[in-house]
Amino acid sequence: MKTKSNELKVLSSIAPADETTAIPNGADEYIRIATAILIRVTGPLPFDIFIQRAENKYTKIFHCDQTLDVGQVKRYHEEKAVKFFYVHNSAQETYSHYVEKLLEASLADPSQLTPRAMRSILNEMINISLDTLYTKTHIDHKGVQFAATAIKGCTQLLEQDFDGLCRIMKLLSSRPYSLKHSFMVSLFSLLLARGLDYESERTLINLGTGALLHDIGMTRVRQDLVTKVDLNSEEFKEIKEHTHLGVRIVDGIKKGITTEIRSIILQHHEQPNGYGYPNGLTDRDIFPLAKIVTIADVFCSLITESPYSRAPLTTQEALKQMQEERGRFDQNFLKVFIKILQPREMSIDEKSELIN
Ligand SMILES: [Fe+2]
């Protein structure tokens, strides 16, 4: 087994550390939110806002439904030296929705959206996904840092073509839960790749970006079909088309979209037993990075709330269900995925890292 001591060093060359990334510690009841997002709130607040007074002590400063006074936010920030604002864990989904809606509204007129504002919104989607990852699983702190750094490298790759990025984000934010699902799948794919000792920077960026874009074709499928439970064969045929549609969409993006990313989008519903789609490929013909995304995609759908699934499962329930679906997933990859998601004791080093 290789050590992972150098992996962050390697990735930090593509995604330098950014102070706006709040790596959660799993024990927090409150989620840190970006001031850049808060000052963009218009109309009544959809959640309460808190500030931290002392360790584990938070005070509500703005109430849900109150119309936010941005001047007051700035005064807290500038005069009272309040660096961070928070929402309660229970408002996580509401906050996540709010950020998606904010992105959608900002993209209605992309000429008004600066690259910096786009980066704030994307960083916040990463933070929200990291919080969910920490709340739902027992991933170690270093793993989360790794995934956070790697996914930033992926968004920076897409930022090289700002118009293309705007088009992608416009599509993803047009469907409820789609944007957060994309970020979650990307994070879990990167964590699985880490568990499999994938080290190449190029491979990790292709994987994370392919995972972000894996379901972009679904945004071109009729919404009523996406949420329908019992699809007839004609309707299922339309759903299956999302893999080809996804490739067609990214073909319109000029920079950064590689053959590997296209293969992930095309093959993320293939199954080693040959019962997948669109081409019914069998085990060794499926691109390994697509197999990783398949596992992350199904897992994220099972553990998170969405209009397309029943009540979310716990991590252990989801993994058990996936283990029972033999043939749908690469068994070796699934074993590693299960291993990295097992509850475990933190090492002394990890504990002291969290305290500091
Ligand atoms: Fe899909």
Image (tube, rainbow, N blue to C red):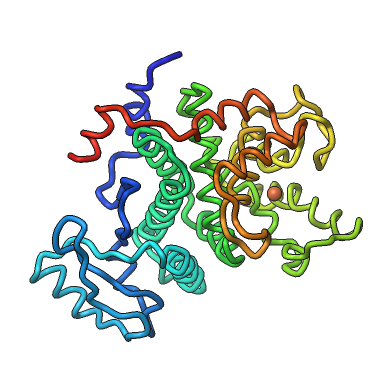
Vertically, is 323 above or below 45? above
Q: Residue at x 64, y 54 (%)?
A: 216
Q: Residue at x 45, y 35 (%)?
A: 343
Question: x and y percent of residue 30 in the render?
Answer: 31, 60
> Would residue 21 be visible to someone looking at this image?
no
Q: Residue at x 67, y 59 (%)?
A: 309
Q: Is residue 19 left or right of residue 43?
A: left
> Would residue 24 be visible to someone looking at this image?
yes
Q: Is residue 61 left or right of residue 138?
A: left
The answer to which image quadrant residue 98 occupies is: bottom left
Residue, far right:
233
Q: Quadrant of the N terminus?
A: top left
Question: x and y percent of residue 272 in the render?
Answer: 77, 29
Vertically, is 266 above or below 98? above
Residue, far left:
79
Q: Quadrant of the C terminus?
A: top left
Residue, far top:
1
What is the total number of numbered labels drawn onto the structure image?
0
Q: Is residue 112 left or right of residue 29?
A: right
The answer to which image quadrant residue 270 occupies is: top right
Front position in the image: 82 or 342: 342
The answer to which image quadrant residue 53 occupies is: bottom left
Q: Residue at x 22, y 76 (%)?
A: 61
Vertically, is 38 above or below 263? below
Q: Is residue 332 left or right of residue 144?
A: right
Question: x and y percent of residue 137 in the render?
Answer: 46, 43
Question: x and y percent of residue 135 in the render?
Answer: 42, 50
